[in-house]
Amino acid sequence: MNKTMQAILQALSYGGIEVESARWIADLKKLDPLRIFVKKLDIEIYNNEYKVPVRLYFADEASMESGNENVPVILFFHGGGWTTESVETYDRVCSRMAQSIGQLVVSVEYRLAPEHRFPVGFEDCYAAAKALFAGELLPRIRPEQITVMGDSAGGNLAAAVCMKARDTGDFRPQRQILIYPALSNCYTEDSPYESVRTNGTGYLLTSEKMADYLNLYESKPEDREDPYFAPLCAEDYANLPDTLILTAEFDPLRDEGEEYGRRMRQAGCRVRIERIEGALHGYFALGIQHLYVQESFRHINRFLSVERAMNEQRL
């Protein structure tokens, strides 16, 4: 990375989080004029008495008219530090994903902190996953056709959903894709991960911001030891889904994502870990023409192709 780019990034990498300002900046994505061309459908599922909005994104017109019969599905949880972003601001990301991998994308509008602290957002995601796997959300979709996926805080939620599904036996995800996931519970100098120190300033997402996000997400200090809050607090990494983990070179979350993959692998899980060289946290939201995004979709498509072949062999 050249000195000019480093100087620009340093100027943009300011300290902590002010929630309303961060949400206002995120909401600017709603002004995207191409959003009107996105092929989508809004539905709802229940988490007890609360209706969780869910948006379906179709790869093309034909898939939109097919009635969602016998099609593979990505269940997606957006990022934003559990406090910002939304299904609306991820419109282009999810639409592009549906087109690039040729699958139906189901994006969940979970409730945000600090108005709704842990475990509320996580439980919204779990309720959506449970409904999808049970055939309540899309009756013609089979469980083995579903991949659970998320980026950043959404990667945290995806990992936690799959972990709770394993613990409870409510359903059994076969695949998960975690994109630069937030899996730890500490982003101070006490963090065991070197990337928190080497990448924690000057690369847009700072360790100070991550510390603020955790403070906003937790309901009480004890939450930080809960593996559904911070999956790296788990004691058991066995019997989790086949997993693809994508990390970014210049990301404070890089090492924890890779460590999670190693722990799963040591426990006997099938895991593929890919580091996107030169990338920053949040790169997945860049345009499809961006090399980092293209590289990520190559990894995702390869992973899904291998999984598809393995499923066919099982059948």
Image: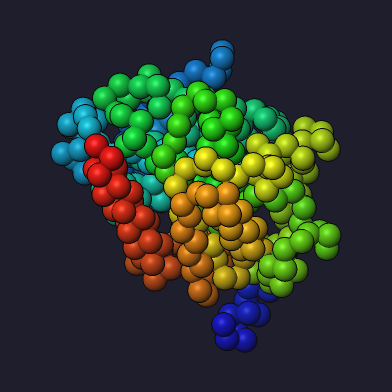
Judge left or right: residue 201 versus residue 249: right
Residue 229 in the image: state x and y as whole percent: 68, 39
Which residue is depicted at the point 38% across and 19% down?
Answer: 136
Q: Residue furthest top?
A: 49
Is residue 290 positioned above or below 269 on the image? below
Location of the C terminus by quadrant is top left
Which residue is depicted at the point 35% across and 22% down?
Answer: 135
Which residue is depicted at the point 54% across and 62% down?
Answer: 247
Which residue is depicted at the point 74% across and 48% down?
Answer: 185
Residue 164 in the image: state x and y as whole percent: 58, 32
Q: Residue furthest bottom?
A: 3
Residue 156: quadrant of the picture: top right
Is residue 12 positioned above or below 171 on the image? below
Q: Is residue 254 visible?
A: yes
Q: How is the image coloured?
A: rainbow
Location of the N terminus by quadrant is bottom right
Q: Is residue 52 visible?
A: no
Residue 255: quadrant of the picture: bottom right
Judge left or right: residue 290 versus residue 29: left
**Along the line of sight, the residue nearer the viewer: 9 or 257:** 257
Is residue 8 positioned above or below 224 on the image? below
Residue 22 in the image: state x and y as whole percent: 65, 49
Residue 286 in the image: state x and y as whole percent: 44, 61
Q: How many marks?
A: 0
**Along the line of sight, the residue nearer the viewer: 164 or 45:** 164
Is residue 175 positioned above or below 119 on the image? below
